[in-house]
Amino acid sequence: MKFPCTGVILAGGMNTRFSGQDKAFLSVGGKRIIDHIYSVFNELFEDIILVTNNPLKYLWWDFNIATDIFPFRSSLTGIHTGLFYTSNPFAFFAACDTPFLKKELVKTIIDNIEPSVDVVIPETSAGLEPLCAVYSKECLKPVEHHLTKEKFKIQHLFKKRRVKKISEEILREKDPDLLSFFNINSPEDLDKAEKILRT
């Protein structure tokens, strides 16, 4: 890793479609998603932060636990918390419901960090992937500004930031099917994830 970077796992969703069960603890192929993400992060980052409003559930892992500072349920709130607590100049963020996150793809993203860049983000034909991206500590104040105005769309942050996009062609070299971006939002997605493993 060229530049010091913290790994941040966002586990703050409401999980309404799973009867309140934390998606991080869902199993895919017999392995909990949080265990998979932690194993990826543990190989890449010396400093790992998990952002959650249910900290007692995560005491068994060797990472720092942080709770949201702003009282809003949004991914931008989690990004703010991760940036606030990181001691490094950059942080890589991943959602807790991505069972196929690949270490090689994450490494490609963090290897593209530059001192003059505020955001390093994958871009595919489906669009930008703001929850599998690097944000610099320089984004902290702009994020706070957006949250105080209750503007929660992450893409709004990019308008006045220095953004470096990683092309789909480069991403597919490490993750041919782009499964790192597959996330589980519903029981149907969970079924699909199991089917992916069987193929």
Image (tube, rainbow, N blue to C red):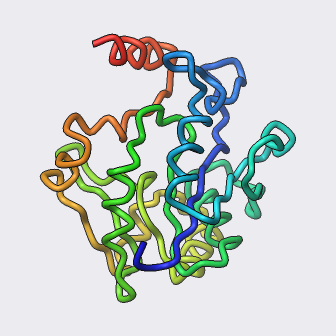
> What is the x, y in percent for residue 149?
60, 69
Q: Is residue 182 above or below residue 20?
A: below
Residue closer to the observer: 95 or 33? 33
Q: Position of residue 134 (x, y in %)?
A: 44, 66
Residue occupying image coordinates x 62% and y 29%: 23
Image quarter (top left, top right, bottom left or bottom right) of the C terminus: top left
Q: For this rendering, which residue is in front, 2 or 160?
A: 2
- In this rendering, position of residue 71 left or right of residue 174: right
Q: Quadrant of residue 100?
A: top left
Q: Which of 192 and 12 is in front in this view?
A: 192
| Residue placed most toward the observer, 196 or 39 | 39
Q: How many labels does the image show?
A: 0
Furthest-bottom residue in this view: 116
Looking at the image, which residue is at 54% across and 42% down? 37
Q: Which residue is drawn at 44% across and 13% down?
A: 188
Is 94 drawn above or below residue 34 in the view shown? Answer: below
Q: In which quarter of the image is the N terminus?
A: bottom left
Q: Viewed as shown, does residue 167 lie left or right of 100? A: left
Residue at the left extreme, as displayed:
169
> At which x and y percent is residue 143?
56, 72
From the viewer's perspective, is 35 left or right of 98? right
- For the point 58% across and 20% down, the residue is 27
Looking at the image, residue 7 lies above or below residue 195: below
In the displayed structure image, the side of residue 21 where residue 145 appears, left or right: left
